[in-house]
Structure formats: structure tokens, C-alpha cells
Image: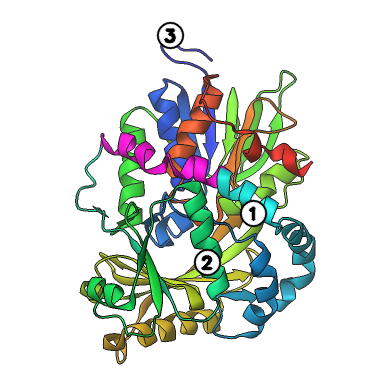
Amino acid sequence: MNEGTNIKSSVVVIGAGIQGVCIALSLIKKKFKVTLIDKDDPGKISASYGNAGHFSPYASVPMNRPDVLADVPSMLLNSKGPLALKWNYVIKMIPWFLKFIKNCSTEKMMHTAKNMHQILDLAIPAYDELFQDIDVSELIESKGILYFWTNKDLKSRELEIKVRNKLGVKQQLLTPDEIHDLEPNIKRIYHGGILYPDARHTRNPKKILLKLFDLFRSKGGKFEKKNVQSISFTSDNKPIIKTDLNSYNFDKAVIACGAFSKKLTDQVNEKIPLETERGYHVHFKGYDHLLSRPVIFLNRGFGITPMEQGLRVVGTVEFGGLKNPASKKRISNLINNAKYLLPELKDQKHEDEWLGFRPTLPDFLPILGPSKNHKNLFYSFGHHHLGWTLGAISGKIISAMIAGENTNLDLSAYNSKRFS
């Protein structure tokens, strides 16, 4: 399949979200012949469209930690809390939850935090490399991200601060007056807060995704809007991708379709415990002037980002798989929480109710690297809340692996073999 001296082998990337597009673009830059396949157009209604828009290099403290276990029952019973479970999904979730519980020791938490920090530290520089070729000046703001809390659950706050200090994450503790100075429109319900000054946010994640996708195509990348049904292999272990209409042969393949990746990894006999965290958003159009930067109210587990579409209110973690309908209760919680935090929204109508799927593994580390059964198959999924932040660095890592280059990183923690 080599065409001339410059073109290397052919690679298919399955999934045209931020992961897939960044991987495809990184491979094109290394002179591979790349086809991107997805059942939808890039950024249509996916997590890469509907996320909070954060570039969060600080977010190394995982959900799997000792203090969370004690809080889970009360979170689930609190209808306004940050965690929910679709009761028709409980039995299916049990194996995942048991693995999650095993990963909630201090030792496992620190293992995850260190390995997340390793790639998060490189996340923004990796985007800056990609952004040299596109104009994102109107789409990105570097004003940090603000977290705040009440006096409840202070042990959890102390743990997060301590772990981030240990890892060398830049963070500024704030008094209530300092929070008010930064964001005067927020109701003064908080007792403390923290600013992550190195974080950024985008005013429209979909526009950035489409600019990167257009760059990929302008460099010779090919896009097929098809639904991948199956993946199999030739006698010399080259991937065959079967869609609803055609069959394609490639030299190498990458599975990067987020929460939908499990359908394909199951087919290649790799039992990866990938689950779906369902997240929601709504917009309050024309009110983005109320905030200067993204804010997150930790006690209620939701955030608000000022975007082109208005204020995007995002959040809640709901376990319920890919097929359950959206929960009206979770949406109304977001609306009520936003109105509680920003009194100016009190009589305003919301728009654009959205549900998206975050791919999550029980140790809260992504899978980045080759399949344990097929040397020409690679994975990039399971980035939970950080898929958007880690798009560009995942692209660099996976493209380097496929090109046989050394990344100077210890990538063993992200290997799928950890679930064997």
C-alpha cells in the first residue's frame, strides 16, 4: 500500500471526535495515508461538541479515591447531588463498580494522579503545536478556571489540594472576597475557592474541532461517513473494517470512538471494562457576560462556561449506558443550580438540552496504545471528563507509537493489558 517514497502505510481512525481528529491529523503530519471513519459528521452531537470547553491541565485528581466511597450512597440518594444511577442499569454496572471500589485506595489514587499528571502537563503545549496551523484567536480564552465550595465536605477539598501540591500543579487558594472580585455576579454562597491560572477555555468546542478536521482534509486526509459494524484481520494481521456498506483493508487501525469503543474491542476478544458516564448541558443564551471564565461549584458537581452560545451549564455524572433516554430530572437540576448560583437567570428560559457520553474506566486512566491481541490495532479512549483536554497529546502519543518513535514517556500505565 506504499505509494511513492514519502507516503508511509495506511491507517484508519475510527471515531471523528476530538481524539480521532487529533490522531488523524498527527498521523497525516507524519506522512501516513489516513482515513477517518464515523457514523456522524464531526462535532454533530458528540461529547466533543457538548463538553464544558475546558482545557484542564490541573485535573489530575481522579474520582477513584478513598473519600468518594463514603460519599457515594448519599450522592445517589440526593436528587440534587452530582451523581445519579439509572435503576434499570444497576445490575449491568455491578462488575464495573466492584473494579472501581478496588481502585479507591490511596495507593491506586496516587498511581492514577501521577499518570494523569504526566500527560496533562503536556496537553496545552500539544494543542499549541496544532493551533499553529489554524486561527483560534477568537475561540480560546486564558483566564483560568475557578472552583469554589461551601464548608461541607472540606476533607475532600483538602485532599484535592494536597495531591495537586504534591504533583506540582499551579493553584491559587482564594478567600470569599477574592472569589467575589473575580466573579461578582455569583451569589455569595461559597466559603472558599481555588483558581487554576494555567487552564483555558474555548468559547465554542465544535468550531475548534471543525477547524482541525478541515486542516486534516486539506492535508490529504480522507473522511468516510459510515457506521463501522465489525473489525477483523487478514492472515498477516492487517485490519479489515466492515461498515454498513463496504469493506476496507488497511495496514493499521485506531479505535478512538469514546464510549462506543467497547463494541469493537469486544469483537477482538479484549474484555475492557469501559462504561458510560452520561453528562448533560443547557444554554442560557445572551448571558455569557455574567461570567469571565468557567466556574465549578464542587458541592453540587456542576459548572458554567461562558460561550458563544451563551452560558453553557454542564455537569452531573449519571451511570445509565448508551440506550437510556435523557433524564428530565438531571436537566432540571442543572437549570435550578444555574439559577441558584446566578440570580440574574431567575426568570430566564434555557435552551438546547443535550446529553452526551463520557467513556470511563474503573481506574480513571485512559487506554492509549496497542491492543494486547493485535499489533496493528491501537486504542485511544477512556479519557472520562478529560477527552477534550487530552485530544492533542493523545494524537501525538498514538501517532508516535504507530510511527515506531520513542515518546520519552512511561506509557505502561495506559496499556489495555492492565485489565487482562
The image quadrant that residue 367 belongs to is: top right
Residue 323 position in % (x across, y down): 64, 66
Q: Quadrant of residue 80?
A: bottom right
Task: Using the image, determine if residue 237 lies above or below residue 102.
Answer: above
Q: Which comes sooner in the sequence, label 3 or label 2?
A: 3
Foreground mark, 3 or 2? 2
Q: Amino acid at mark 2?
A: Glu
Magenta-tinted stretch? 115-133
Left or right: 278 in relation to 170: right
Q: Secondary structure at mark 3?
A: loop
* Most common secondary structure along the magenta stretch: helix
What residue would you read off at disc 2?
Answer: 158
Element carrying mark 1: helix
Q: Of 208 and 340, which appears nearest the observer?
A: 340
Residue type (three-letter) at the residue carrying disc 1: Met
Residue nearer the viewer, 225 or 319: 319
Q: Which residue is mark 3?
A: 4
| Kind of residue indicated by mark 3 | Gly
Residue sitting at x 60%, y 33%: 411
The residue singled out by tag 1 in the image is 109
Q: Is residue 121 above or below residue 63?
A: above
Residue 10 image position (x, y, % from top left): 52, 23
